[in-house]
Amino acid sequence: MKKLTRLLAVSALTVLVGSGVIETVTPQSTVQAAKKAKAKKAKKSKAKKAKKVAKDKKYYTAKQWSQVLRYRKQAKKIGVTAKGMYAQKPQLKKAFRPGKLRASYINRTVNWINFYRTMFGLSKVKADSDWNTSAQYGAATLAAADKGLSHGLVGIKRPSVVSKTDWQKGADATNQSNLYQGVSSPYDVITGYLSDDSDLSGLEPGHRLWVLGGIDRVGVGQADGYNDLRVYATNSYDAAAPVKQLAYPRAGLTPYALVSQGAPWSVSWSDDYMGDASSKPQVRVYDKTAKKAVKVTHVNADRSGYGFFGTTVYFLPKKSQLKVNHAYTVNISGVEDQSDISYTTRLFNLKVNGDFY
């Protein structure tokens, strides 16, 4: 005797036969309806995506849009994951061991550096194995202390688990490096250094200038949430390939994430700045898309030498006036011994899902 049971959840008939075997019979009309609903949903999603692309695409020339797509493809290929970063995990509590990063993590970090350097028209850098070892000591000693960031570990008490010799290695490394706390993804680390929106020393974009400056190699260190990116050697403080001029954001296309968090904008030259307070630069930023002037504050100039640059003018456009897809004209004048400059940048969405940028 067959027993018939109706299941409302799947609109199908389930038949229990005498042998205890369950057979499910789905009406053909139900299958067709499901396929039709799925196709309709896919079509709607495709149309929505096409509409969104068309909305963005209208801001760009055909050549610019092609470049945007190439940048997105390159960024996707590099990736953002920090998963499996260690070849040897650092020991930071009961005993100290700096650990070692996997080559894939180091390569991803260098690839992000070179992605941006190429975008800004700069030569590529490579990872130096000795510098990687040094930078790992820098990151690991910071993580072992877990008291924030300090070049040379100045002001941070040495944990008892770290020997004086290892602590000195960490101090030497952090004195020659960019330092970051709170992120571990190579994308977030490098994009954060370029943005320089959380610089503890102020608005001067020194981390950016090192990453986009006259360097030819780096060392990569990461322990927990502490990053050490070694960028120079104190016993050889010379530019590997001097950069004559660097504008940030760049002329042309610039990823919106590089300025979206309140990053200072800047222009740097290789020549030394010899001006004073009486020769303060004049800076104007204009939103060509919204046809409106952008408020600019904190205009300053100095000759700190970061990245082997001699002169840097930096300033802060109002964050709320910076919009994705908008084009901005930057005009800078009154910089001693430098010609006035004027250029346009357009901020595009790189479509990278980082934790912070």
Image (cartoon, helix red, strand yellow):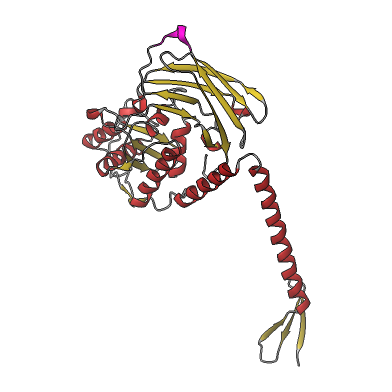
Q: Is residue 247 left or right of residue 99?
A: right
Residue lying at 54% horizontally and 21% vertically, measured from the top left: 331
Quadrant where the image shows the N terminus: bottom right
The vertical placement of 45 against 297, above or below, is: below
Q: Quadrant of residue 161?
A: top left
Q: Quadrant of residue 186?
A: top left
Q: Does residue 225 appear anywhere in the picture?
A: no
Q: Quadrant of residue 269?
A: top left
Residue lying at 51% horizontally and 50% vertically, measured from the top left: 73
Q: Residue 28 location, x and y as percent?
A: 76, 79
Q: Residue 47 location, x and y as percent?
A: 71, 55
Stretch in magenta: 275-280
Instruction: Check if residue 125 falls in the magenta segment.
Output: no
Q: Residue 303 location, x and y as percent?
A: 37, 18
Q: Residue 198 location, x and y as percent?
A: 48, 29
Q: Does residue 22 appear anywhere in the picture?
A: yes
Residue lying at 22% horizontally and 28% vertically, measured from the top left: 235
The vertical placement of 166 against 155, above or below, is: below
Towards the viewer: 232 or 185: 232
Q: Is residue 12 left or right of residue 201?
A: right
Towards the viewer: 202 or 127: 127
